[in-house]
Amino acid sequence: MSTKLTPDEAIDIAYDTFLEMAGEHLDPADILLFNLQFEARGAVEMVETRDNWDEEIGVLIDPDAFAEVWVGLVNENDEMDDIFARFLISHDAEDRQCHVIWKL
């Protein structure tokens, strides 16, 4: 059994992937908003892995085997209310699967 990703590792993987792929998957207006607002309101957070990813990706997953990370902007209450991407990242370093749900 491999070691689970630390929250920092999961966040780094998600953010690097986000920066690499955002241009292909987000609306130009969302990219502009993200770039303008990220310094003040941006957040990349590891959240509790939800168990309904099968509805999104069509495959049942073990929530304990994956980290879920959100990339977005927080509001004045420090709640992430504008999510640009949700990542599901495998803890298994040998088979580092990554699923992304982009903002529509």
Image (cartoon, grey):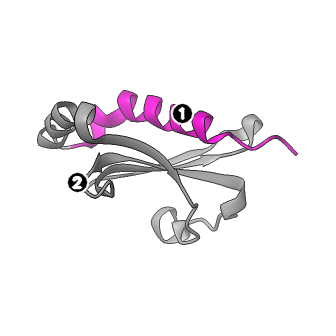
Image quarter hosting the C terminus: bottom left
Question: Magenta-highlighted stretch: main secondary structure?
Answer: helix
Q: Position of residue 61 (x, y in %)?
A: 65, 63
Which amino acid, by three-letter code, is at mark 2? Glu
Q: Is residue 34 left or right of residue 53?
A: left
For residue 91, which numbered disc appears in the image?
none
> Helix, strand or loop at disc 1?
helix
Q: CA distance from mark 2 to mark 1?
A: 27 Å
Which amino acid, by three-letter code, is at mark 1? Ile
The part of the chain drawn in magenta is 1-26
Residue 5 lies within the magenta run: yes
Q: Is residue 3 left or right of residue 40?
A: right
The quarter of the displayed image where residue 15 is located: top left
Residue 80 vertical placement versus 6 (above, below): below
Front residue of 58 and 100:
100
For residue 13, which numbered disc appears in the image?
1
Query: Which comes before the other along the chain, label 2 or label 1?
Result: 1
Q: Position of residue 34 (x, y in %)?
A: 22, 38
Front residue of 16 and 75:
75
For residue 76, which numbered disc appears in the image?
2
